Image: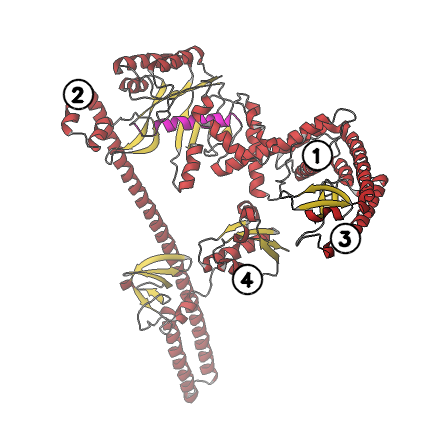
Amino acid sequence: MLYPKNLEHKLGFDTIKELTSERCVSDLGRSFIDKIRFSDNYSLVKKLIGQTAEFKLIMQLHSAFPEQNYIDVTASLLSAQTPGSYLSEELFFDLKLSLNTILQIQQFFEEKELQFPLLVDMVKQAISEDLDLVDIIGNIDGIIDERGIVRDNASKELFQIRKKILSEQSSVRRTLERIYKMAKNSGWIGEDMSLTVRNGRLVIPLLSEHKRKMKGFVHDESATGKMAFVEPSEVLEANNEIRDLEIKERREIIKILRDLTADIRPHILELKRAYFLLGLTDFIRAKAKLAVDLDATAPLLVNERLMEWTFAKHPILYLAHEKLGKATIPLTVELNDENRILIVSGPNAGGKSVMLKTIGLIQYMAQCGYLVPVSPDSKIGIFRNLFIDIGDEQSIENDLSTYSSHLTNMNFFLSHANKNTLFLIDEFGTGTEPNLGGAIAESLLEDFVKSKAKGVINTHYTNLKIFADKNRGLQNGAMKFDGEQLEPMYILEMGKPGSSFALEVASKIGLPSYITKRAKKKLGTQQVDFEKMLKELEIEKKVFAEKNQEFLEQNTLLKQKMEQYTGLKDFLDGEQKRIINDAKSEAKRLLKDSNRAIETAIRDIKESKADKEKTKVIRKKLEVLKEETLEEEEAVIEPKDEWQNEQGKIEIGSFVKVKGQETIGEVIAIRGKDFEVAIGQLKTNIKANRLEKVSKKTFKTATKEKPRAKVTGVDMSEKMANFSFNLDIRGKRMEEAMLELDNLMDDAIMLGYNELRIVHGKGDGILRNLVRNHLKEYKQVKGFKDEHADRGGHGVSLVSLV
């Protein structure tokens, strides 16, 4: 049940219908707009939303879906059911074009059941297995040519008749041209006059004063009377013969069309279902186009009475803001069995009414089978009843502005509201004396709570905010307001009431201070304190949120620094272990070599029986070995040649060593006194006074074993999903435009697209020439041409790829 009768207009759904109609390409599709109905059938709503979501995916992934010749011939088909009737050449031509479109739709969905199950099922149900579209189209094409005219070879009789007509017409024309030449030479015909047609016959235009000089029949005169159109007597019989042949031709064409109509008559009911599919396809595609423009999604639909929305946006407001380049502030709202009714308060012009219409319109759109502008992880429930009491103060009619109208609506709500109802009430209880209005509103609210209906209510009454805070099933909400700047933020905040900020706004717009002070006294301390508390709470919450954000940013930065430090420490520890292990290995080798040399010397001394000269030589060799071993030990402990500092200023690209450590890296950036140094796979900031410059040889030696770069593949599915064959480079610099063009060409060649659309604008044609000259460098480009004049003309290039 819907209330009131003009609910669609109040919510703005009539505008959604108009936007859908604009995106249909045929009257067939537009005819479905009048059939849109609010439904509480969960399975049906899920199916309608799913079909639209699948079509949105088709628009994003496929560019080959048929978009032309959605022609409605159903009325003509029904009239052809009468035996003996026939369709005209024009209708058969329209039938051929539109049946071709239906066939293309059917062929598009072949073998796509896994990808688009709902749309494939829709096509299968609409097109009977007994209906052979290829055969019917072939029969029509054999009779009707590409101009929409019956072909000459449609029958032997027609072929002979048209052959005779052509022969007679040729003979008549030769005779008339001879007579025309004679009359021209005789001065009976004026300048720039030629053979023409009157009453279906070729005639000669004569000057009126000479019309009696030629035997024949005068068919007509010019408006001024200066010219007469004469059919010479020499061709009268021949023209009569042509007229008879044309009558025979028309009779034969009707016979052919009648036979062709009889061939399709048994399939008319099946064809009618196929045309239902054609219109439904156009309608669903229009909804999908609107979904793309609205950035709408298919959230989780549940067969429950609940609402869990995030990033919800008013559809019409979103489109208006997109045109102006403005952002639309999203809405987050939640209604469930625990918190069934939301009481929203806040200042005037703070966005309460827009919030209420956003909820109503999105819920209504969803239950009509539309995709809606909310986050895809949102949950949308199904309600059987939708009641609204929303007054539009900007409307001239303003038919719900009086208190009696409000009470009439509330009476209806109380009589019909139940657990399956969603109600939306704007400015609850206003229109009468505030104390009485607040009391009646609170009494009504008690009954709404008992009905277990879900709802959202806008109010300024303090007693309703307190009532919501103290009773189960209700929750407070507030439209956020900048208490310092006294400006609305248009953000719904759940869980706390809001202040009306009436006194503060009055002061801001320049109302004298003594007026507001006097108002505070008249209002009483309790209400003033309550409003003051809400205002201070709002300001404190804003300050806390800013401090919390600052803390989060600092915490994130600290984590990054800790990760960098841990990584650097692990790297340095590893380098230290490697150096020590290398030094130990080298020391072992030196010791082993020394021991071997000493043993050899002892053996030689023994063999020479301590000969002085021989012993002297051996000692000399040991001294040399000692010196070499000491040099190698020093090299192991401190490689002086490679670790020697270099002179000069440390710049970007310099190789540096951290003082007191064995860490070597490359300077990649300089920020004041801090140097950003790349050490292996790590990057860290080090003060200048902690670095010393080293040679390139040192760097290479220390980084001999470099980790191999990780090679990643190309995600073709992601590229396919994000690819667009349309590129708009208007207003871009040449380098930027050519780079984007190259990227588009690379992706198109990789994904196998054979047609691209480049929007470069008209102007002086400079960017157009640059684009086309650049495209000539690609061997994959088969050619390019201008877009149709209605869709951009010289300002758009259509590029064909091999």
Does 136 appear above or below 466? below
Q: Is residue 478 visible?
A: yes
Name the residue carrying label 3.
177
C-beta proximity under 8 Å, tags 2 and 1: no
Q: Which residues are magenta?
A: 348-368
Q: Residue 130, how many percent across, how many down?
A: 76, 30
- Badge 3 density bin: few <14, some 14–19, many ≥20, Cα 10 Å: some
Q: From the viewer's perspective, is 510 left or right of 214? A: left
Residue pictured at 82% horizontal, 37% vertical: 248
Could you tell me which secondary element the residue under label 3 belongs to? helix
Q: From the viewer's perspective, is 667 left or right of 372? A: left
First of labels 2, 1 by sequence position? 1
Which residue appears farthest toward the left when viewing the image? 514
Q: From the viewer's perspective, is 137 left or right of 616? A: right
Task: Report the front residue among 289 and 723.
Answer: 289
**Marks 2 and 3, Cα distance to the nearest angstrom?**
109 Å
First of labels 1, 3 by sequence position? 1
First of labels 2, 4 by sequence position? 2
C-beta proximity under 8 Å, tags 2 and 3: no
Name the residue carrying label 4.
773
Does 142 appear above or below 742? above
Task: Report the front residue among 593 and 88.
Answer: 88
Residue pictured at 74% horizontal, 46% vertical: 212
First of labels 2, 3 by sequence position? 3
- Amino acid, disc 3: Glu
- Amino acid, disc 2: Thr
Name the residue carrying label 2.
525
